[in-house]
Image (cartoon, helix red, strand yellow):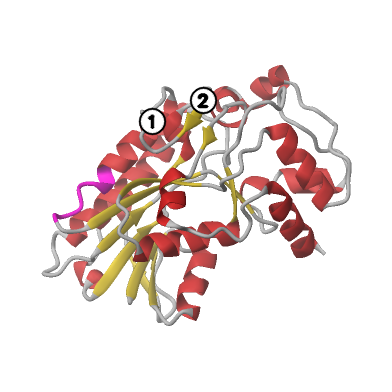
């Protein structure tokens, strides 16, 4: 299958592209600079520019574009960038789909666990949206994906925290843990939906070939609060993890990002993946910690 990917240079996109190629698929990567490799095509989502011919013959489009949610403090300018980088990319892709004679069969357009906001209880795909910046952003992001032409199966994976020794959400935390300086954030009782990078990639590939459409929670089936998660990561790097960072300090350092991202609690359940028979490599936190330990050796 010919598969077009935006955001292919990120942590998930890079690994996904490699995995798809290894399975015999043709991968086309969209880049925002002049194309420099045979598998690259240039586009400019800020100007809504993408040659529709890039989608000719594509069986699937995967949209992973978006500025990093936790990379910088949330100023007004940064919040505009977070929104624009997602909506412009998604709308440019769906517009290009509408200009080809045969649009792709499936459009996987990334969303996030932030859709649910921070709240108690188990969150399955039928739970409504929460409140706050991330929830509103995810609502608009998913709505943009559904402007794809009729006949295109639209899937919006609501991904949690992706665990990887290569960076991602663990990028700032792993070096501290290796030095024995890491620890829980806030009271540590908030739930973070998590998944390892191999399972994230496998889940996206599963969604390409399944009949599922609409929102799909992409996380491990075992829930974990921050206390358990950080302790497991500490064990993976053979270091203690007891230097707790209190909530007031996080709010001082990160502003509103602290409450919506770091201190938010989302006990997300991958109900639709479970029902569809998806098989995780690392379903439990102990499995994930063992995998991380092996990768970090």
Give the labeled residue for mark 2.
121
* Element carrying mark 2: loop
Q: Which is more toward the observer, 199 or 146? A: 199
Q: Considering the image in quadrants, where does the N terminus appear?
A: bottom left
Q: CA distance from mark 1 to mark 2?
A: 10 Å
> Magenta region's main secondary structure?
loop
* Element carrying mark 1: loop
Q: In the rendering, at what x and y percent does residue 217 appear?
A: 45, 44
The answer to whether the residue labelled 1 contacts the one labelled 2, judged by CB atoms less than 8 Å apart, is yes
In percent of the image, x 40 and y 55: which residue is there?
276
Depicted 62 relative to depicted 194: above or below: below
Residue ranking furthest to the top: 248
Depicted 239 relative to depicted 61: above or below: above
Residue 157 shows which numbered tag? none
Magenta stretch, residue numbers: 144-150
Q: Quadrant of residue 111?
A: top left
Residue 127 shows which numbered tag? 1
Q: Which is more toward the observer, 171 or 252? A: 171
Which of marks 2 and 1 precedes in the sequence? 2
Q: Which is more toward the observer, 145 or 7? A: 145
- Asked if residue 74 lies left or right of residue 1, the reply is right
**Is residue 158 at all visible to an observer of this figure?**
yes
In percent of the image, x 39 and y 38: which residue is there?
125
Q: In the rendering, at what x and y percent does residue 232 appear?
A: 77, 44
In percent of the image, x 62 and y 26: which residue is there?
263
**Is residue 10 at all visible to an observer of this figure?**
no
Q: Which is more toward the observer, 233 or 83? A: 233
Residue 120 falls inside the magenta stretch: no
Depicted 287 relative to depicted 141: above or below: below
Q: In the rendering, at what x and y percent does residue 178 appear?
A: 84, 49
The crowd level at tag 1 (other Cα within 10 Å; few <14, some 14-19, many 20+) is few
């Amino acid at each position: 299958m010919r598969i077009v990917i935006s955001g292919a240079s990120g942590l998930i996109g890079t690994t996904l592209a490699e995995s798809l190629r290894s399975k015999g698929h043709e991968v086309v990567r969209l880049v925002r600079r002049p194309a420099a490799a045979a598998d690259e095509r240039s586009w400019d989502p800020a100007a809504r520019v993408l040659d529709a011919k890039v989608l000719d013959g594509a069986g699937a489009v995967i949209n992973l574009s978006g500025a990093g949610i936790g990379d910088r403090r949330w100023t007004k300018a940064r919040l505009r960038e977070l929104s624009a980088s997602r909506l412009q990319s998604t709308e440019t892709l769906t517009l290009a789909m509408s200009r080809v004679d045969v649009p792709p069969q499936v459009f996987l357009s990334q969303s996030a666990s932030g859709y649910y906001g921070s709240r108690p209880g188990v969150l399955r795909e039928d739970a409504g949206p929460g409140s706050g910046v991330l929830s509103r952003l995810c609502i608009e992001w998913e709505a943009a994906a559904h402007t794809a032409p009729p006949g295109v199966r639209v899937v919006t994976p609501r991904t949690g925290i992706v665990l990887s020794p290569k960076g991602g959400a663990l990028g700032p935390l792993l070096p501290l843990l290796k030095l024995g300086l890491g620890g829980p954030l806030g009271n540590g009782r908030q739930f973070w939906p998590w998944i390892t990078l191999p399972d994230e990639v496998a889940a996206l590939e599963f969604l390409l070939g399944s009949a599922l459409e609409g929102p799909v929670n992409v996380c491990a089936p075992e829930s974990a609060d921050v206390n358990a998660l950080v302790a497991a990561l500490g064990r993976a790097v053979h270091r203690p993890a007891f230097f707790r960072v209190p909530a007031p300090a996080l709010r001082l350092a990160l502003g509103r990002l602290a409450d919506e991202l770091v201190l938010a609690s989302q006990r997300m359940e991958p109900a639709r993946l479970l029902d569809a028979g998806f098989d995780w490599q690392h379903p439990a936190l102990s499995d994930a910690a063992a995998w991380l330990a092996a990768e970090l050796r």
